[in-house]
Amino acid sequence: MKIAVTCENSEVFQHFGHTPGFAVFEIENNVITGEKFLASGDSGHGALASVLAAENVDVLICGGIGNGAINALSAANIKVVGGASGNVRTVAEAYLAGTLKVRPNFHCMHHHHDHGEGHTCGDHGCGSSKCSH
């Protein structure tokens, strides 16, 4: 079995579609036997499901995630566990032990507002607000 966790600096990244990459854990007999980092590259929300499917991931653990991404992952037979936070290895171990604590309101709601001149603000509804110039 393989578990992927959205990852930045060994912590669960809180927005699936913008994650820099994934900590991917190889599991045998309910124990982590291998770990690697899988960069997300320039993949968008939908393409990330394909990236994880190509890696034969069985479970995705993340912070926030939208319904479209959940649907794409489900179509690829990847179970989604949202609302996680903390160290990626600790989170994966807690999932395996059945003790992972998650926020029930982990669905992202995307509302982007263009203010002109290349400035966009987005309230993602997942505890993440992105502003870029």
Image (tube, rainbow, N blue to C red):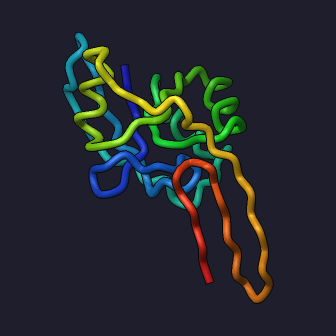
In the displayed structure, 113 sits above or below 77; it is below
In which quadrant of the rendered image does the C terminus lie? bottom right
How far from the left and from the top, in percent, is residue 127?
52, 52
For the N terminus, give its image quadrant.
top left
Question: Can you tell which quarter of the image residue 120 is in?
Answer: bottom right
User: Where's residue 9, x and y in %?
Assistant: 29, 57
Q: Quadrant of residue 95?
A: top left
User: Where is 80 relative to 131, above or below?
Assistant: above
Rendering coords of residue 91 (x, y %): 29, 33
**Residue depicted at x 65% and y 38%:** 69
Tell me which residue sits at (62%, 50%) in the image.
Answer: 125
Q: Is residue 75 above or below residue 83?
A: above
Q: Residue at x 53, y 43 (%)?
A: 64
| Foreground pick, 110 / 68 | 110
* Picture layout, residue 120 above or below residue 61: below
Q: Give left or right: position of 62 versus 45.
A: left
Q: Position of residue 78 (x, y in %)?
A: 54, 24
What's the residue at 53%, 22% (across, down)? 79
